[in-house]
Image (cartoon, rainbow, N blue to C red):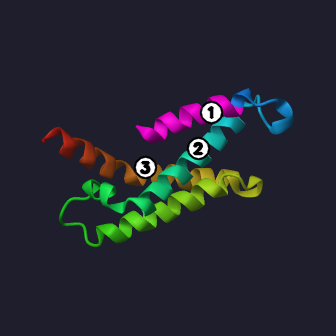
């Protein structure tokens, strides 16, 4: 939920910026918001890895390592969205990443519902 709140707030702020600061384009505001949200989420993976262990069933090996690896991937992906030359490729890579982690989010959601 925090990811979406950050995404919404930064999109609005990015769009409201004067044009000389890169504002007024919804596409650019959304890209900046995605970048910041990914960096925020990645840093939270690195700072609080225990809170992300609920995303893994018991049979997954090395869940802590996966949490750290996904945190690094999210930070690098978010920062890479600011590099104009690779925006399209990074966007595709992050879209694939989000599809790949979707089952973990469903698992965590269903697990929390059983408590």
Q: Which mark is residue 34?
A: 2
In this rendering, position of residue 100 left or right of residue 6:
left
Q: Which residues are magenta?
A: 1-14
In this rendering, position of residue 92 left or right of residue 87:
left
Q: Position of residue 84 (x, y in %)?
A: 76, 53
Q: What residue would you read off at disc 3?
A: 99
Residue 26 shows up from this direction: no
Which one is nearer the viewer's eye here, 104 or 35? 35
Q: Which mark is residue 11?
A: 1
Q: Position of residue 82 (x, y in %)?
A: 70, 52
Q: Earlier in the sequence, mark 1 or mark 2?
A: 1
Is 76 situated above or below 36?
Answer: below
Q: How far separated are the C-alphas under marks 2 and 3? A: 15 Å
Q: Position of residue 99 (x, y in %)?
A: 43, 49
In this rendering, position of residue 47 left or right of residue 78:
left
Classify mark 2: residues with Cα within 10 Å, few (<14), some (14-19) or many (20+): many
Q: Residue at (18%, 38%) from the top-left corner? A: 113
Is 85 situated above or below 3?
Answer: below
Seen as rendered, the residue at the extreme left is 115
User: What kind of element bears circle 1?
Assistant: helix
Q: Which quadrant holds residue 9?
A: top right
Is 87 situated above or below 5?
Answer: below
Q: Residue at (71%, 57%) from the top-left corner? A: 86
């Amino acid at each position: 939920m925090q990811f979406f709140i950050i995404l919404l707030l930064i999109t609005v702020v990015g769009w409201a910026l004067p044009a000389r600061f890169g504002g007024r384009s919804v596409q650019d505001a959304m890209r900046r918001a995605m970048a910041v949200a990914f960096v925020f989420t990645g840093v939270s993976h690195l700072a609080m890895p225990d809170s992300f262990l609920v995303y893994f069933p018991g049979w997954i090996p090395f869940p802590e390592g996966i949490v750290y690896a996904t945190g690094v991937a999210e930070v690098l992906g978010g920062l890479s969205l600011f590099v104009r030359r690779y925006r399209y490729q990074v966007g595709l890579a992050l879209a694939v990443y989000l599809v790949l982690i979707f089952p973990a989010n469903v698992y965590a959601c269903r697990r929390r519902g059983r408590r």
